[in-house]
Amino acid sequence: MSLLNTTHDPALRSWLDSANRPGGDFPVQNLPFGVFRRAHSNEPFRCGVAIGDQILDLGAAHAARLLSGSAGEALAACRHSSLNELMGLGEGAWSTLRAALSRLLRADTQPPATVREALVAQADAELTVPAHIGDYTDFYASIHHATAVGRLFRPDNPLLPNYKWVPIGYHGRSSSIGVSGQTFRRPAGQISPPGSERPVLQPTRRLDYELEVGIFIGTGNPAGVPIALEAAERHVFGLCLLNDWSARDIQAWEYQPLGPFLAKNFATTLSPWVVTLEALAPYRLPWTRVAEDPQPLAYLEGADLRRAGALDLQLEVWIQTEAMRSAGSGPHRLSHTTFKHSYWSMSQLIAHHTVNGCNLQPGDLLGSGTQSGPTPAEAGSLLELTLGGKQPLTLGGGESRTFLADGDCVILRGWCEKDGYARVGFGEAAGTVLPAAPIQNAK
């Protein structure tokens, strides 16, 4: 697990004033990685690092030979249109590059003119998915979410017996993953109306969001060689926010016996910046399992896990309806929770994913599953917040929601902060629902 070092010093300031503003997401203690180009241009996408309200163009930094030695070698991997090559170099290279960039951007450094020339305002940039995602696996790691959803459908037996023993997951689709700002059409699929013996093909009426944390894999593992729990986090490049949109009525009909399909493969929205595990080191917490629950099997158990396997990442969901935008109103907050409530940790998800010999690759993405806390206000989906659509939410301005309407924009936000350390933010993952496409031959 990442250790504290000089890059975490809360006294550090940048010569870029916007990086020193209180409450900002991207101080010099953060330095998350992403992929961008200037908006409304035909420039190739290239790797960058967020600092304040700017992006340091890592391709330009490499061309200007701003770094040398092992840091320069790591920087050379950033001259491409994705982070995959850097991800594959391993945690030593990631840490060396991040430390060198920290020194380059600190207030006690007199930066060469080429550094300032390599900055692009985030407001003038177009961001894209930060890596080529070969495979995407979505987990179900929040016991509070699993219990709340189970209670809606199985009041007498809300949690299935395997949940406390095995991290549940399913293989998703990477082709429909987009970055913040993604728009997508309301999906259609087979739905079984109550009391009907025949399903119908129609647009979903129960469209939902899911508040999740995305885990980007850095170095992979050879096929047939599991990743041990104590080594798992060395394979994690960093984290992002993830919205795994879900069509609940399509899901209810199709998921048995093999799980989600059309209900989830139409869109997944990521925040564009990948925050490294090293930047998150000050916010680690002990991972615990209550004594009355089954304790993990040996391959999912370890001292490092118990000492610092959890992360106090604050998570929020906001909604801005079409009516809000027309009225010039800001978004309305739906919920606030923290990743520390996750029943299964990052390292446990990776150890279980590979225990059968499954090989992960640089750029693979794992979703944590919907993150919900122990109270109703901490729910990570509308399915929970509205009790399956039975209890509409009041948004103000005369609007209410049970599930999402066309024109709704859902915004995920995340950050870590505590006394004695700088606030490290994730930015936003925002996505907007468009009307469904016309359906041909629906009957």
Image: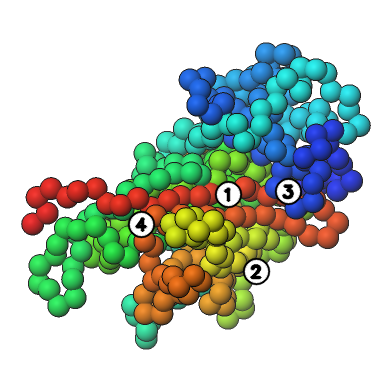
Q: What residue appears at the point 61 percent right and 71 percent down from the top-left corner? A: 289
The part of the image, by quadrant, that contains residue 134 is: top left
Q: Which residue is mark 1?
A: 428
Please state which of residues 229 and 77 is positioned toward the viewer in this rendering.
77
Above/below status of 420 relative to 161: above
175 left or right of 339 in image? left
Q: Position of residue 362 (x, y in %)?
A: 52, 34
Q: At numbered mark 2, what does the secondary structure look like: helix, strand or loop? A: loop
Amino acid type shown at disc 4: Asp
Which residue is label 3 attached to?
24
Residue at image mark 2: 288
Residue 250 screen position, x and y as percent: 26, 61
Q: Residue at x 49, y 70 (%)?
A: 397
**Separation of residues labelled 2 and 3 (CA atoms):** 31 Å
Secondary structure at badge 3 equals loop
1 and 3 marks in contact (CB < 8 Å): no
Residue linked to disc 4: 406
User: Percent x, y for residue 238?
Assistant: 61, 43
* Callout 2 touching callout 4 (CB < 8 Å): no
- Above or below, 180 against 47 in this view is below
Between 437 and 204, the residue placed more toward the observer is: 437
Residue type at mark 3 is Gly
Q: Earlier in the sequence, mark 2 or mark 3?
A: 3
